[in-house]
Image: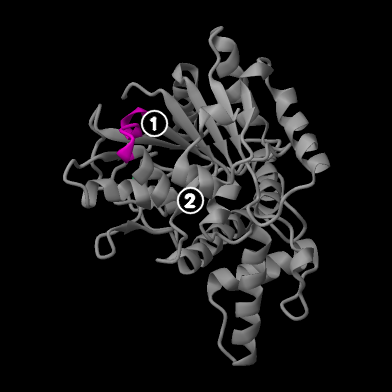
């Protein structure tokens, strides 16, 4: 790996700033779409039927008369199904196979809606960030850790190979069985560690290989939309999305590898920029990784918190509450810089040390 001095952690707020919808809006979008189709007598696809049944059975949400506020989060849905699966339990009317099918259908749904919503329509914040780092000659000392499943930063970093004469590689921290997979070259690659998985990854449960989807035509990463067969053994592959729930399946060896590498870069970093991330209670594993890195050596990195919502100026009370919440997590509080920057401002101009 390169000599990483900076780590940029991307939370949900970073994706939101580039136009990714909130999760509860994704589910509402889906229901609006299904309702419209049903009124036009368009038959539902298999995955859509599974999801309509799931929302009705588990949450009493009907395709007619649904309200955005009623929807559970994506993490709640996946978390509940994952715990049942791990405990070998089922729900009334939901056996193991149906639990699995529902889980996959949820992931494919989120991927589909995000692909449609984001295609060519992002606000370029991630792009500006990478451009700025490149201009400042800091890109090869930077590692990204993403807590998001979407492919906004993936496509920006992936393009550094396509469009750039220097041909920089995207390094997901794991290997893939795809023919077009280019193994990252040390010193020429940008690490992107997606510790909750990614919407473009599929794993074969038989030969334990990982594949990603890539469209040669668009030269971009797309979400997976179905359990495509493994090219090695034809087994239907499964999506790799590990939501930040209290219970976490840590058995996936690819995710384990990504966790270890994330820890490694955090240990060595001089500066860590935490963007659009509010440290949700359920995401104990991110705090765990940060704590391990903090205790590893006495020289803990400078932390920059970039979390201002550009649409509203939070009242000072709310701000100090949020700051206290973050302060409590870390031991070396003097190293934390609450920048009051929005993600967009950080992408364009970076953090000025003199501000703190
Ligand atoms: Zn296989």
Q: Residue furthest top?
A: 298
Distance between the Cα atoms at labels 1 and 2? 28 Å
For this view, does 21 lie left or right of residue 150? right
Q: Is residue 179 magenta?
A: no
The numbered mark, 1 or 2, whose residue comes first in the sequence reads 1
Q: Quadrant of the C terminus?
A: top right
- Residue 180 seen in this snapshot: no
- In the rendered image, residue 127, in percent from the top left (x then y), is placed at 39, 51
- Chief secondary structure of the magenta portion: helix
Q: Which numbered marker is on residue 134?
A: none
Q: Residue furthest bottom?
A: 40
Q: Residue furthest front?
A: 354
Tell me, what colour scheme is on the image?
one colour
- In the rendered image, residue 79, in percent from the top left (x then y), is placed at 68, 46
Q: Which-is-in-front pick, marks 1 and 2?
A: 1
Q: Is residue 137 magenta?
A: yes
Is residue 119 or residue 64 the one in the foreground?
A: 119
Determine which residue is flagged by label 2. 239
| Secondary element at image label 2 | strand
Q: Which numbered marker is on residue 142?
A: 1
- Choose top left, top right, bottom left or bottom right for residue 3: top left
Q: Quadrant of the N terminus?
A: top left
Picture layout, residue 346 above or below residue 6: below
- In the rendered image, residue 320, in percent from the top left (x then y), is placed at 78, 35
For this view, does 51 lie left or right of residue 209? right
């Amino acid at each position: 790996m390169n000599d990483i001095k900076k780590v940029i952690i991307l939370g949900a707020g970073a994706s939101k700033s580039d136009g990714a919808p909130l999760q509860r809006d994704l589910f509402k979008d889906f229901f609006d779409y299904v309702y419209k189709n049903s009124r036009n007598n368009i038959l539902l696809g298999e995955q859509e039927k599974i999801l309509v049944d799931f929302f009705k059975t588990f949450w009493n949400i009907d395709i007619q008369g649904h309200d955005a506020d009623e929807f559970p989060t994506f993490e709640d849905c996946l978390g509940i199904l994952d715990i049942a699966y791990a405990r070998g339990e089922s729900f009334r009317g939901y056996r193991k196979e149906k639990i699995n099918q529902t889980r996959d259908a949820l992931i494919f749904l989120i991927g589909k809606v995000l692909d449609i919503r984001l295609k060519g329509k992002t606000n370029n914040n991630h792009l500006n960030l990478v451009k700025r780092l490149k201009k400042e000659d800091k890109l090869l000392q930077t590692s990204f850790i993403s807590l998001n499943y979407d492919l906004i930063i993936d496509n920006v970093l992936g393009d550094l190979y396509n469009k750039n004469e220097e041909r920089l590689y995207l390094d997901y921290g794991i290997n893939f069985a795809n023919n077009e997979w280019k193994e990252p070259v040390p010193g020429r690659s940008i690490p992107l560690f997606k510790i909750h998985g990614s919407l473009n990854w599929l794993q074969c449960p038989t030969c334990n290989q990982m594949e990603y989807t890539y469209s040669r035509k668009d030269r971009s990463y797309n979400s997976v939309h179905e359990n495509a067969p493994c090219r090695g053994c034809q087994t239907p592959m499964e999506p790799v999305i590990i939501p930040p729930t209290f219970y976490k399946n840590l058995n996936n060896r690819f995710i384990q590898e990504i966790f270890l590498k994330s820890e490694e870069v955090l240990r060595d970093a001089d500066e860590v920029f935490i963007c659009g991330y509010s440290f949700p209670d359920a995401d104990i594993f991110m705090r765990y990784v940060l704590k391990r890195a903090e205790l590893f050596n006495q020289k803990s990195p400078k932390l920059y918190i970039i979390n201002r919502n550009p649409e509203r100026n939070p009242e000072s009370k709310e701000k100090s509450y949020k700051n206290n919440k973050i302060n409590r997590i870390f031991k070396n509080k003097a190293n934390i810089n609450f920048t009051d920057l929005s993600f967009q401002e950080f992408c364009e101009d970076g953090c000025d040390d003199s501000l703190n």
